[in-house]
Image (cartoon, helix red, strand yellow):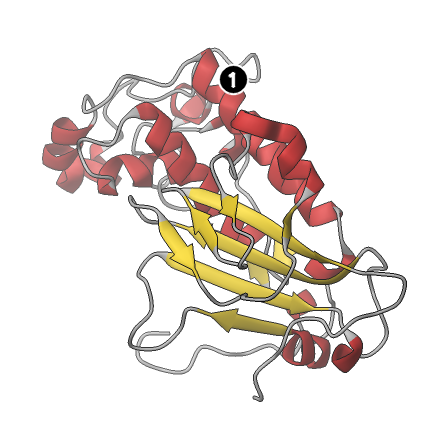
Amino acid sequence: YNGAPGGYAADPTEVVNYVSKHDNQTLWDMISYKAAQEADLDTRVRMQAVSLATVMLGQGIAFDQQGSELLRSKSFTRDSYDSGDWFNRVDYSLQDNNYNVGMPRSSDDGSNYDIIARVKDAVATPGETELKQMTAFYQELTALRKSSPLFTLGDGATVMKRVDFRNTGADQQTGLLVMTIDDGMQAGASLDSRVDGIVVAINAAPESRTLQDFAGTSLQLSAIQQAAGDRSLASGVQVAADGSVTLPAWSVAVLELPQGESQGAGLPVSSK
């Protein structure tokens, strides 16, 4: 952090992970700042969900700012403790997300007025359709996190033994995050009797990505995401017979390696 090593915890239960909190702009406002101008509403909703997936499907304590599941906006307000209900409102009736309701206080955000003026009308304000879709994405992520104890391993030694990452190094595909969680024989006791391992694949890129790391495996898309169908963050994900996995732009897939009658080989973990 600020040029110094940032590791400070031994166990994931000592770490609170977030992509958006009460200080600074909401996640939706940051996406409005940073997304390509041509990105439409549907794409921006997926950007929000993909961002939250890195927290919801990671080890550690997941923390989300109030209203993240509703695309909450504070109309670019950075520190809103003194901005009243007008900028801090959260609409649980799912009619709007409080975006573009006025310029934030000049004392904190005056230096951003020029860029706010340029980006605030780049796309339409989200409405009921987008808020319902984001709510469905969030419920999907919550259900996935609850679906297996492998998402909450609890102590650092277990994480080191079971968790690994693919698509790393100089030749990695940009925007593609791939985490594996082993529950095979090499990991020790089975923590989830349904699976020998889980793969979390997050494509935070505007193009599709294909993984070739799991040849010979029998990965299956999580039943939760299969049931969600076209409204899932995994909509369009393809798992080929040869084990390759193709993910559309801005997608999240939880892939499971089913356990047979007994604990199997699982997913390999590199030495650390």
Where does label 1 land, which residue? Answer: 91
60, above or below 21, in the image: below
* Badge 1 density bin: few <14, some 14–19, many ≥20, Cα 10 Å: some
255, above or below 141, in the image: below
Q: Is residue 20 visible?
A: no
Residue 62, image x, y percentages: 61, 52
Q: Is residue 106 visible?
A: yes
Residue 125, image x, y percentages: 32, 17
Considering the image in quadrants, where does the C terminus appear? bottom right
**Residue type at numbered disc 1:** Asp
Residue 191, image x, y percentages: 83, 65
Residue 114, image x, y percentages: 9, 34
Which residue extends farthest bottom?
271
Q: Nearer the viewer, residue 209 or 49?
A: 209
106, above or below 204, in the image: above
Residue found 67% across the figure and 30% down from its top? 227
Left or right of 170 in this view: 97: right
Image quadrant in which you'd find residue 151: bottom right
Image quadrant in which you'd find residue 40: top left
Considering the image in quadrants, where does the N terminus appear? bottom left
SS at mark 1 in the image? loop
Residue found 37% across the figure and 34% down from its top? 28
Residue found 27% across the figure and 34% down from its top? 32
